[in-house]
Amino acid sequence: MLFENRAAIVTGGARGIGRAIAEDLARQGARVVIMDPGTSKDGARTEGASPAEEAAEAIRAAGGTAIIASESVSDHDACGRTVALCMENFGSVDILVNNAGVLRPKMIWNMPVESWDVVVNTHLRGQYSMIHHAAPHMRAQRWGRIINMGSEAWRGTVGGANYGAAKGGVFSLTRAMARELGKYGVTANTVCPAAATRLTLDAAVKEGFRKRLEAGLVTQERYDAVVNMGGPEHIVPLIAWLCSDAAADVNGQAFRAEAGRVGIYNDPEIRASLVKAGKDVFTFDELSALLPSALLQGYVNPAPAETD
């Protein structure tokens, strides 16, 4: 099997995309730690049956191996305990899928600092914490696969600056990890998924996108793509490929995965430049004359000021 004798940690692995990834890795031989405290989509604790235990039981029933860590990635020490749990039970940490996420959407002027902190701590600091604790083991064994889940929101979003900013940080974190860990046989890549889950496409999300469409903040094409997106099954094949030996030289890249399509993002780069002879200081008048025609040709303001 593809991942026989490999051990994987999947954060947020109890539901949605995370569960689909955990089940797929286990089906292909990996021994899986499902790290999930069973919170609601805004990160609040919930009562009742553990979704992580339900996911682990489903894997076991299908003949796979899975244990749970009912811990939050927002707790740095808990991330260390989860990595230690994987080492104690399976003897290695080979695959880390940083999938855990929460949403607390608000416009920036209405967003309490707590909502900013909860989202950034889960998506960005949580990925740092998991990598921080897993990296020494991956370095020592000179093999590892890190998948950081990103989002299209990193390119700019409305009503979720906390989420978009955190996901932008994830892209940069991935590129840094690729450079720090690559020589040890450890790769790090970002996957930006589009799949219908409780986090991404409930009634409130659909209503929010409808309002954005009516306000002209998103196109009809974008709206249709969101409300008709496929399920997690479209995401897992790319994850499996990136975790395999076939992708040993794929490092620091950012992919888009959705129903029937896999794409790759451009690396950040300077698209065009103005260069002044002698490296003298540009004057305000020079920039006023040159910037619109040389650097901003074809540019359209994504949110122009309203006019009466």
Image (cartoon, rainbow, N blue to C red):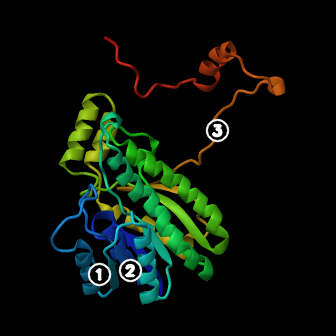
| Separation of residues labelled 3 and 1 (CA atoms) | 46 Å
Badge 2: how crowded within 10 Å, few (<14), some, or many (20+)?
A: many
| Separation of residues labelled 2 and 3 (CA atoms) | 41 Å
Residue 286 appears left or right of 63:
right
Instruction: Tell me the kind of residue under disc 2.
Output: Val
Q: Is residue 72 above or below residue 152?
A: below
Instruction: Tell me the kind of residue under disc 1.
Output: Ile
Badge 3: how crowded within 10 Å, few (<14), some, or many (20+)?
A: few
Q: Is residue 162 above or below residue 11?
A: above
Q: Nearer the viewer, residue 304 or 4?
A: 304
What residue is rendered at 23% in x and 60% in y?
40
Residue 243 spot, x, y in % from top left: 49, 72
Considering only order in the chain, which callout, 3 or 2, is on the residue closer to the N terminus? 2
Residue 124 appears left or right of 195:
right
What residue is rendered at 63% in x and 15% in y?
288
The answer to whether the residues at label 2 and label 1 have Cβ atoms under 8 Å apart is yes
What residue is rendered at 41% in x and 22% in y?
304
Q: Which mark is residue 59?
A: 1
Identify the residue position indicated by label 3 in the image: 270
Q: Which mark is residue 32?
A: 2
What residue is rendered at 50% in x and 78% in y?
94
Q: Is residue 253 visible from the viewing direction of this image?
A: no
Residue 277 spot, x, y in % from top left: 82, 24
| Separation of residues labelled 2 and 1 (CA atoms) | 9 Å
Residue 77 spot, x, y in % from top left: 43, 71
Q: Quadrant of residue 137?
A: bottom right
The answer to whether the residues at label 3 and label 1 have Cβ atoms under 8 Å apart is no
Considering only order in the chain, which callout, 1 or 3, is on the residue closer to the N terminus? 1
Q: Is residue 268 above or below residue 85?
A: above
Residue 51 spot, x, y in % from top left: 23, 72
